[in-house]
Amino acid sequence: MLRDPVFTFPFEITSEIFIHCLPTSYTDREWNTANPCEAPMLLLHVCRSWRERAIGTPALWAKMELSMDTAHSHDMAQVCLMRAKSCPLSVKLRRWPSKAAEEDSWPILFFQTLLGRASTLEVLEVLPIPLYYIRRLDQLPDSSDFPSLQKLAVGVRVDVLRGEPMDERPCVRLFANAPLLRGVTFIGDISPTFFPALPWQQVTKYTGVCVPIDYFLDALRISRNLVECVWVAGMFDLPFVEHLNHSSLKSLSLEKNYCFLDSFSSTYILRFLTLSSLETLRILDCEYNAFSDRRFLAFLTRSSPPLRQFIVKLDTDIDLDADEEELGVDAFLSMSSLVELEIWHPIPKFLTIFFSHLNNVTFLPQLRHLSIFHLRHRSEASVRSLLKTVHAHLSARWDARHHGPGQLESFYFEWDRDVGDLPGDDLAPFRAMASDGLNISIKSPKRSYV
């Protein structure tokens, strides 16, 4: 009889192999569910020995996603909690019953069970949850005590919010005693004033997904120790917005939510902000005219941030023959401390304008890493023409490396689709810079040229 080679390993090695079988962020789902086709449930059905080792590996059961609209999840949760033992827990509670099912008390019973393990609960996601259940959870004994909680995400069902505004009856206990809490995510129309007892003063990362602009700014206003923020803009109803100066924020990511037809560019929020410590700015829905927009330029001038990393994803709907008046690069003139720049989805006209400034050592003088991703193009002729333009200005910048304050170290250039065979004469200048010490990569999705 052939012996399973797995059992020639010590138990600890086998457990580690099993843990690597769990869904990850690189798969469709990174949370453990009761899916029999995925680990850990799949491991239980190979043989008796595998089952015993899987059950005896607490880390396999410590990250769970539970659907709250079925009572079976309560039984599954109790099994997972028992097998996880004292392992740090990450729990996602989704698909809560609608308000019409108020007689269903088992979701509350499960949350009470979870409270009994609050000392090991590090990550909790509750979404989307009807307001009715939030009220119920807030009334539970010990619902404020989460001594190990580090990350919290809450989403409230939108149709419920329209019927009962959250500001009228804020939670007064829920998550109040969470001394290790550092990351908070709100999804939907959730005002930070609804959770006034949250330890906002210790939160270092806040994420607002489809959160109104005034609610997002309120979260920044009461979280004075924030270091990182993410805002995914949604529907927009212009309220009175007071300007905010935040002195500790170092990283800001902005993105438009395309689920709303009437949503607006997330860069709109910058007109209300002054961020004097900002080091990383990501704009993932940037319009081309933003680089010459006086309000964006005013934000950079007003903040004078020590910006070191700028990642921008440009509008993919703009025509390749867009008017050059829409393609300014003025904003880069206010980024004198920038070290790393990523530009996504640019059109050739924009890059021609950008590179025409690059040979001037006073333009982005500290730049060391330049990456161009998913460059759009129309024909092979346009590809060759742009390569010549890029080479002319990039080589001038490279040749001046000993005369400026910063030295370019890497250059990454990738088209959005295959561009066919490129003549060696077009690539030779880039290969020469590579042999001279510049870290260069020029490629398409299927080919690598340099």
Image: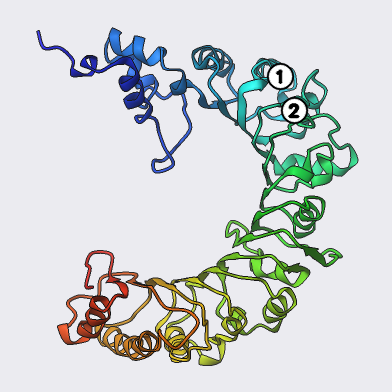
240 relative to 16, above or below: below
> What residue is disc 2 on?
133
Q: What's the distance in space between the residues labelled 1 and 2, CA to CA? A: 8 Å
Residue 410 spot, x, y in % from top left: 37, 72
Q: What residue do we see at 79% from left, 32% from top?
A: 176
Residue 257 spot, x, y in % from top left: 60, 58
Residue 386 spot, x, y in % from top left: 33, 87
Q: Tag 2, which secondary structure? A: helix
Residue 422: which quarter of the image? bottom left
Residue type (three-letter) at the residue carrying disc 2? Tyr
226 relative to 294, above or below: above
Q: What residue do we see at 75% from left, 69% from top?
A: 274
Q: Tag 1, which secondary structure? A: helix
Q: Is residue 358 left or right of residue 180?
A: left
Mark positioned earlier in the residue sequence (1 or 2)? 1
| Camera sees residue 165 | no
> What residue is disc 1 on?
108
Q: Nearer the viewer, residue 7 or 231?
A: 7
| Camera sees residue 300 | yes
Q: Are marks 1 and 2 in contact (CB under 8 Å)?
A: yes
Q: Is residue 6 left or right of residue 147?
A: left
